[in-house]
Image (cartoon, rainbow, N blue to C red):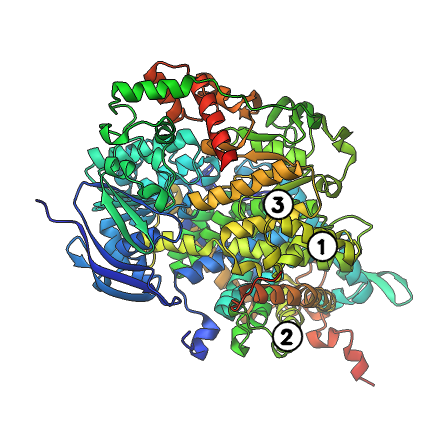
Amino acid sequence: MEEKSFGEKLLGVWNTRTIVTVAIGAALFGVLMNYGSIPIFTNTSLTTAMIVPVVVGAMFGPVPAAVAAGVGNTIADLIGGWGMYPAWSIANAVASLFIGALPLYGAYITEGKFDVKHMIIYVVCVIIGNAIAFGVVAQVLTVVFEGGDMNVSLLQGVYASVGNILVECVIGIPVIKLLANRYASRTNLTEEN
Amino acid sequence: MKEPIIEFKDFSFRYKTQKNPTLHDINLKIYPGEKILILGASGSGKSTLCNCINGLIPFSFEGEIKGSCIVNNTETKKSSIFKLSNTVGTVLQDSDAQFVGLTVAEDVAFVMENDVMPRSDMLPFIDKNLNMVGMREFVDHVPFQLSGGQKQKVAIAGVFGNHVQVLIFDEPLASLDPQMGMTAVALIDDLCRSEEKTVIVIEHRLEDMLYRSVDRIILMGEGTIQADVTPDELLKSDLLKTYGIREPLYLTAMKYAGCDLDSVKNLSDLNSLELSGENTAKLKNFFTEEREPVIEEKHEPVLRFEHVSFNYDGGRNVLEDINLEIYKGERVAIIGKNGAGKSTAAKLICGTIRPTEGKIYLNGTDESGMTIKEIGENVGYVMQDPNTMIVKDIIKDEVGLALTLRKKPQEYIDEKVNKALETCGLYKMRNWPVDSVSYGQKKRVTVAAMMALEPDILILDEPTAGQDYKSYTDIMNFVNTLNKEYGKTILFITHDMHLAIENTDRAIVFADGKMIRSDKVFTVLSDEETIRKAHLKQTSLYTLAVRLGIDPEMAIRHFIEYERTVKTHE
Amino acid sequence: MNNRFVINYTPGPTFLHKLTGFTKVALFMVMTAAIISTFDIRILIPLLLINVAEVISMKPNYKPITIMFLITFVTVTLIGNIMLFVVSPAAGLNNVGAEHILWQSGRFYLSKEFLWYIFVVFVKRTASFASVMAFALATTPSEFASGLNKCGFPYKVCTIVSLAYRTIPDIANDFINIRNSMMMRGLELTGKKVSLWKKLKNTVILLVPMIFTAFGKVGNIANAMDLRGYGKNKKRTWYAEHDASKGDRIIRILTVVLLLLTIYYVVMYRFINPWPAKFWCPWLQPDEIQHINVFDTLFFMKWFKK
């Protein structure tokens, strides 16, 4: 496989295949937001949708991952009937830039590459991404555009970040591991008795 | 002689990711207006060949081309996928994937939108193209309202741009019910004959394609052209067997009867083939000769539907007042067109949806008191596409998943898993990654995963869809072993009439939410009304029997009985 | 799929439904900008009414909209305001600029301005909810895509939107089937007896085949698009973008007027002659208002001060 430039790894190569992947990612995000949530208690749930930017990112880089999450979240809000939270859609897209950055540090899961080093970088990215997205971006947007109170918004941000980090690590890492194992092509198979 | 519109000269192609060429030594000329059928088993190179014509090779799939491929006087590798799409229209196998628009009109307009055609210019073309395929009244329909056959017609209208001269159909019959398949074959023929297009069809269902005449058949095998012959020549040779293509049923019957095929004129067209007196006598004898009937043992029912109705949220009944019994060790085909209620019935058996009215008994116990998990221990449901079921990366772990989830002790899991793996002939591969085996073997893995729970009933949803004859035979032999040696009750949800004839004891037919028939396969397949209502079609045995003036039901029954004795002696 | 769907795949019969995608997208964007630009109830109320009228004019199925509104109301307004009362009782002072205390108990208190603040925020949120609803009800996904493209977004981004809508029902279907088959194999995803940890672990089992199935469709769809010339040119036209009618021209003019008014308002009342507090309040005079730095309102700031 040819080595891609840094810019290509970051922005992705926008051919038809990328567009279809991002679109399907967005659709899957929308479906998982609506059907794939794990309820904790009333009105609160962990969503598994954030696994989508991980996969799209692994295939095409962070920007396609962010687009998939942003479009997916907006669509999910529109079809799902859980309400409209545009600030959170944007925050999710920003978080996805970090979560979907796997190819930037060499974790090509479609080639079966995901080891302990990648896992640690992934966790760090997840934490930083969520902190920036829900600690800063979502807050600024809520306060400036929606007139929300910064204290409340910040608490919600901390809460959402913790939930997301939990999902992205506890579910994310085993899923990436399984995907990487399944994508890895293996040779020298022998029949055993 | 006209100039060929497509010409391959000493052509070969190797995918970038592969060591050896997928196509080699291809020399082929196709002339304008011809109707060509490309036959071949999976991996024979037939799809690759067509992708070389439409430009997906080399523009979407990278690789190395040697020799030349000329389409409409242009060397393809010097052209582009866009230029080629003006000449060549391709209808892909998966008509769902092909449908990219959100309405019928939009999907047909897709090619014109990409051509930056103003909207006002599009309208007459959309109208004309939809009219040609008989879909004009569906112009505003969304894809989810259409059947597989309708989607395919839209797909045809959608590739029919301005100047398209060649139409390629990649396995057009794969996901259609028998009647829709027949309509598709007729439509393809009309496009070729009246619109004067060159048509190339990739299929392995020879019998269905011969419903309308084909000019030439290209038989692919091992990456190259093995034969370039007329249909009659092909049927008289033994190439079909060599290259893993199923021969038409009537031909099998003629062979069983010991007919002399070389003397038969128009062998490829059942309606006009000329039978000599000797051949007629042999066939009549074969179809009427009494044989030892298959002994039937009555067992206790494992599954019983009692006045079962179902609807979603109080809407129209999807299933209405169904009463049926399935006996232990039976092999049953559940037949009917899409939306007739057969998958709903399967979901009801599995407990993923529950009857609105009525009761379902599993081994005599009312299912309404059982959880999905409990039902899952008695009923194994195998989905059509194994990829929708496989989770783990190692075969052994995948097979043991259901037991691991039930927190069984490790020794118990190992014992059951090993047994299931042995039953399914996968034991030697138990430590292999799931993705390193073929599609057919993956299918086995999913069946083995069900077998680990030792269910009484296995439901197989379209087990042979998208598979060539060899893979089909492998799977069916395997399923029959499960039935005969392990006494499993098998339910097939299927469109495939060959499957029903060769591998089941009874057919249950659904139409419009009602169970319209439950009888022996040969009785169902010789009843015109059932055939019409359930979107089936008469088999070529039926047509042959009618031509000979024999009762079709008897002819099909004798054929089945003969075939089973042949198979058991093999 | 379910009756919570608001989006229509086929255009409806009313005036707003019949507008072109471009008109609808442009109106929606300007409307959103107008609602975002102000915290002044004198402007928010008319904007709310316009959007509510739009929704009513389309004679929608009110059930999903009501459910959606109630959920938003409960999660954001109700819970949000209880939190606000606990964490930030000074929100009235911070945003409106004064405090007339109505009730007090220990460190908790309620002021007239606090109530005014939550009322205005509620109106603003409801107005934007109504505008989203009006847009979602009026626009088919294809019109959305073509309208976005006409507004200057690259068409490749716009196709992502329409393609995502195209595949959602298929993927939802796959999801339900995969979930059912996994449940038969003994996967527990719901139920009170199942611990959160186990639910998380079991979700992994569900996601892997889902991801393989969903992304497994990419190759075929991309081929189908390539074979029909997708990406051939720098531009493309849209079947969904039909010719503009008289109604479109009127709405487009009104949209431009709304845009100009918004710009005028922002320039005049937020830069040249701004109200001293973030929120306008009927019973306060400009000289009564204290100016509070937003960052001083954060609850942890006091930890840094002596």
First in sequence: mark 1 vs mark 2? 1
Q: Residues within 10 Å of mark 3 (few under 14, many from 20)?
A: some
Q: Residues within 10 Å of mark 2 (few under 14, many from 20)?
A: some
Q: Amino acid at mark 1?
A: Ile
Q: Amino acid at mark 2?
A: Met
User: Along the horizontal axis of the image, is B190 left or right of C150?
Assistant: left
Q: Position of residue C273 (x, y in %)?
A: 56, 69
> Marks 3 and 2, Cα distance to the nearest angstrom?
31 Å
Chain to which the residue tagged by mark 1 belongs = A
Residue A135 placement: quadrant: bottom right
Above or below: residue C73 compared with residue A89: above
Label 1, on which residue? Answer: A38
Task: Judge depth for marks 1 and 2 and give the one in front.
Answer: 2
Q: Residues within 10 Å of mark 1 (few under 14, many from 20)?
A: some
Residue B114, visible in the rendered structure: no
- Do tags 3 and 1 sit on the same chain? no
Q: Amino acid at mark 3?
A: Ile
Chain to which the residue tagged by mark 2 belongs = A
Chain to which the residue tagged by mark 3 belongs = C
Task: Judge depth for marks 3 and 1 and give the one in front.
Answer: 3
Above or below: residue B274 compared with residue B343: above
Label 2, on which residue? Answer: A119
Q: State the residue in front, B501 or A19.
A: B501
Quarter occupied by the C terminus of chain C: bottom right
- Element at label 1: strand
Seen as rendered, the residue at the extreme bottom is: C306
